[in-house]
Image: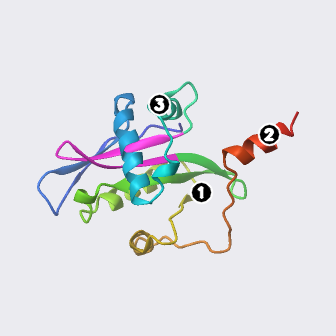
Amino acid sequence: MIGPIAPRTVTDMSQTGALEITSAARADVPLILALIGELAEYENLAHEAVATEESVATALFGARPTAEALIARVAGKCAGFALFFHNFCTFAGKPALYLEDLFVRPEFRGRAIGKALLTHLAALAVARGCARFEWQVLDWNQPARDFYESLGAQPVSAWINYRMSEDALQRLAAQAS
């Protein structure tokens, strides 16, 4: 983790109560796992959601954390989360911020919570000296694409994503011996 994340309270203008964005705590791991499950359902990828409380706790709070998370709450109720990590921009010679997941629960959508999370992360990226802030969105998720583009984000069509899943990763790693 590079630098702290300061808690932030934002007035939620569309409803009573305030929106609070804070860094996830170890006690939030079951909540984060539930949010991951809700996101997987929304994306029709529940069959891929195999994370456990232990794996999430290790990733976020283990001896060598590999990710961070923010929790958004409205009037004390969990509204959503953002899970992110740092990668590196070699051409700029600086860190970059990669948003792995952003999810706002359906009952809280339309209240600028996603925007508040992205704004918080953008400010964090600037404070940490990041060269860029990136994420992916499923091609069929037009509401998310429209939302991101309304904030000034642009799709990067010049790059093709590649992924090596666990089985292929194991096979390739076996060739290292």
Most common SS among magenta residues: strand
What residue span does the magenta drawing correspond to?
67-84
SS of the residue under disc 1: loop
Q: Amino acid at mark 1?
A: Ala
State whether residue 113 is above or below residue 70: below
Q: Amino acid at mark 3?
A: Ala
Badge number at residue 131: 1
Q: CA distance from mark 2 to mark 3?
A: 25 Å
Q: Which residue is mark 3?
A: 57
Q: Is residue 72 magenta?
A: yes
Q: Of marks 2 and 3, which one's residue comes earlier in the chain?
A: 3
The C terminus appears in which quarter of the rendering? top right
Which residue is pictured at 40% across the width and 55% down the height?
A: 41
Neighbour tally class for label 3: few under 14, some 14-19, many 20 plus, Cα within 10 Å: some
Q: Nearer the viewer, mark 3 or mark 1?
A: 3
Q: CA distance from mark 3 to mark 1?
A: 28 Å
Neighbour tally class for label 2: few under 14, some 14-19, many 20 plus, Cα within 10 Å: few
Q: Which residue is mark 2?
A: 173
> Residue 92, percent across and down?
68, 57
> Residue 2, percent across and down?
53, 39
Q: Nearer the viewer, mark 2 or mark 3?
A: 2
Q: Is residue 131 magenta?
A: no
